[in-house]
Image (tube, rainbow, N blue to C red):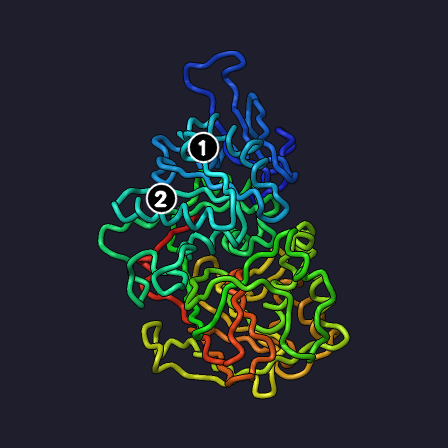
Amino acid sequence: MPDSSSSTTPDIGIDVSDLITIIPPSTTSSGDQARYTILSASPTTPPRLQESRVASLPKSLVSSLSTWTLPTPLPPHLSNLTVVISPASGTRVAPETFTLLIEPLLKILSIPISLNQVHALTSATSLASLTRTNIIPRARTENRSSILLLSGDGGVADILNPGAGLDDEGEIDTDYDGGGDDGDTPEGYVPPVLALVPCGTANALFHSLQSAPENPFAAAMRVLLFGKATTLPTFTVTFPPGSRVVEPLSPEDSSVDALKEPAPPGKGTEFPVKLGVPISSLRGAVVFSWALHAALVSDSDTPEFRRLGSKRFGLAAQRNLEPVPKVYRGEVELVIEDERTGDDNYDGAKRMEIGSEGLVYLTVPMVGRLEKGFVLAPKSTPADGRLWAVWLPGKWSGEEIMRVMGGAYDGGGHVGMDKVGFESVKGLRLRSEAGGWTDGRICVDGRIVVIPKEGGEVSVRKNLGQTKGAFKVLL
């Protein structure tokens, strides 16, 4: 991968963080053709491809030219590329990002792409359907493929859980790869490779894998051209019978719009959601959460809030922290990670009960960042496959919670603060008796599931057999 950590190169007037690739002059070219072509992404939203020609390069780029030049032949992941565009993701920049940046880049670099390899999603179930009918069948027949995904974390969630159709029992079918409980995939399966373009709201997976680059679109293009594929670590969440997926609210859903005044903290378990189909399990690659974090994601998932981008979470936080933060009740047992038991010994691992007096916040991220600047698990490294539990036990004031969140925005400074729990885990169990849930909303990579009032058990467990994972991702 090219090193984009340097500052502006004065000889060419382009910030290195904006650079994508450099095309050297051919040995037979002369005149204007005997120039280097520099391709970069504008530091704007949406981004545009910028093309510059220079007679010579600064020494810093000459010495590293081979790392900026696309090899011949093309890397394998560029030979069979499918482009997926999610127009509704985040602030809706995906279509223009493709038209203004990606399409001209692929054309200049002669990377083959045809119209039938470009898919603009038209509904909330389009990507799940495409995964079921196209991406997975090709992988099962030993066809190497890559997916350039212009979306947010929700797009990755749809690919990991493509069973948007109902199975015979009326539940979402998430057994997309034919693997067993250990996450292994069948013989002959070639894991598709994901190349992420951050067009969502938080883009947690992208910013965690790429360490929050200054120009995320330029970084995404560099990763597409020069990145190496590695297994995408995942975890599985199982839910009790009667659990249901929450459907995204549309402009027509004004009767349940979360912009309306929410129920006061501690006053029952009602919340403005639109319940969908039953669900028994989901796979994730970003974060599991319950309590405050799940409430923020759920309450802010409306058309009006989505237009605010990442600011939507702050507005939802104000409404959940005033007048006093809610204390969530439920039995929580962490399954601790330690070298003594190893990854494959789940049942024999050490347990830790937390939240005997309730919790206000519980997240289990598999990434370091939930937003570009929000470092929730500072000990996490890209694609390391580790889960981290972060929790706030007992009663907290709004000011205390905001101080903790401020620490996360300050590079992960919340870890080590008084009363803040932080632990490496293999998974967890969350249980409640009938009527015991304070709030039964669970968040898995931005998708909300509501647990029935009758209670039951939610379990989280990281998937093993990662060397045969269902998907790979470019780093």
Q: Residue at x 42, y 67 (%)?
A: 281
| Residue 160: percent from left, percent from top | 42, 56
158 with respect to 144 (left or right): right
| Residue 363: percent from left, percent from top | 55, 70
Helix, strand or loop at label 2? It is helix
Looking at the image, the residue that sits furthest to the bottom is 356
Q: Residue at x 61, y 41 (%)?
A: 93
Mark 2 residue type: Asn
Along the viewing direction, whichever of 147 and 116 lies nearer the viewer: 116
86 with respect to 416 (left or right): left
- How many residues crowd around disc 1 within 10 Å: few (fewer than 14), some, or many (20 or more)? some
Mark 1 residue type: Thr
Q: Residue at x 51, y 31 (%)?
A: 103
Residue under label 1, please give it: 69
Whether residue 475 is visible, yes or no, is no
Q: Disc 1, disc 2: CB below 8 Å? A: no
Q: Which mark is residue 134?
A: 2
171 with respect to 264 (left or right): left
**Looking at the image, is 73 positioned above or below residue 269?**
above
The quarter of the displayed image where residue 248 is located: bottom right
Along the viewing direction, whichever of 112 and 281 lies nearer the viewer: 281
